[in-house]
Image (cartoon, rainbow, N blue to C red):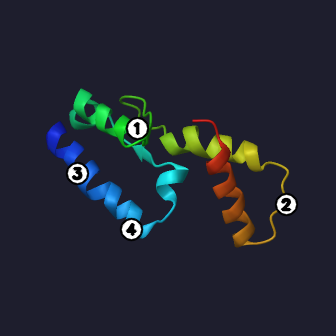
């Protein structure tokens, strides 16, 4: 896959699908987990991601032992929810959505 094809896929397929299936997610922010493949790091792709106001979670190159979500998402989320007593799944969902809405970009 080349960068132009991938950029088109993001613009023409992914964004409309998110808008249709997960209402409100585009305003909360979309995070993409990319590896360092050329189509993901090409200038055209990076421009498209910025234009769509998506965020990319950086992944260290050649590091199979690190799970990027463990480092970039779950650590700060754990810190944010530390000390809170959440009684059920709904309270957990609300707390996570609130954290996503208010976290610095």
**Contact between labelled residues 3 and 1, with CB atoms less than 8 Å apart:** no
Q: Position of residue 72 (x, y in %)?
A: 56, 38
Answer with the quarter of the image where residue 6 lies. Answer: top left
Judge by depth and name the residue closer to the eye, 15 or 34: 15
Give the structural element (helix, strand or loop) at label 1: loop
Left or right: where does residue 23 sit relative to residue 105? left
Q: Position of residue 46 (x, y in %)?
A: 31, 32
Residue 67 seen by the camera: no
Q: Residues within 10 Å of mark 3 (few under 14, many from 20)?
A: few
**Count of marks placed on residues:** 4
Give the structural element (helix, strand or loop) at label 3: helix
| Distance of label 4 from label 2 (alpha carbons) | 33 Å
Q: Which residue is mark 2?
A: 85
Please report whichever mark, 4 or 1, sits nearer to the chain's N-terminal start.
Answer: 4
The residue lying at 48 percent from left, 37 percent from top is 66
Q: Which residue is mark 3?
A: 9
Badge nearest the viewer, 4 or 2: 4
Is 29 drawn above or below residue 86 in the view shown?
above
Please report whichever mark, 2 or 1, sits nearer to the chain's N-terminal start.
Answer: 1
Please report whichever mark, 3 or 2, sits nearer to the chain's N-terminal start.
Answer: 3
Q: Which disc is residue 64 wearing?
A: 1
Q: Which residue is mark 4?
A: 20
**Contact between labelled residues 2 and 4, with CB atoms less than 8 Å apart:** no
């Amino acid at each position: 896959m080349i960068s132009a094809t991938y950029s088109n896929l993001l613009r023409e397929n992914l964004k409309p699908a998110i808008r249709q299936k997960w209402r409100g997610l585009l305003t909360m922010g979309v995070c993409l987990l990319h590896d360092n493949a050329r189509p993901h790091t090409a200038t055209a792709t990076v421009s498209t991601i910025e234009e769509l106001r998506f965020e990319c979670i950086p992944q260290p190159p050649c590091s199979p032992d690190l799970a990027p979500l463990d480092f970039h998402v779950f650590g700060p989320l754990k810190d944010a929810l530390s000390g809170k007593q959440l009684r059920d799944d709904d309270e957990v969902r609300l707390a996570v959505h609130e954290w996503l809405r208010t976290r610095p970009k």
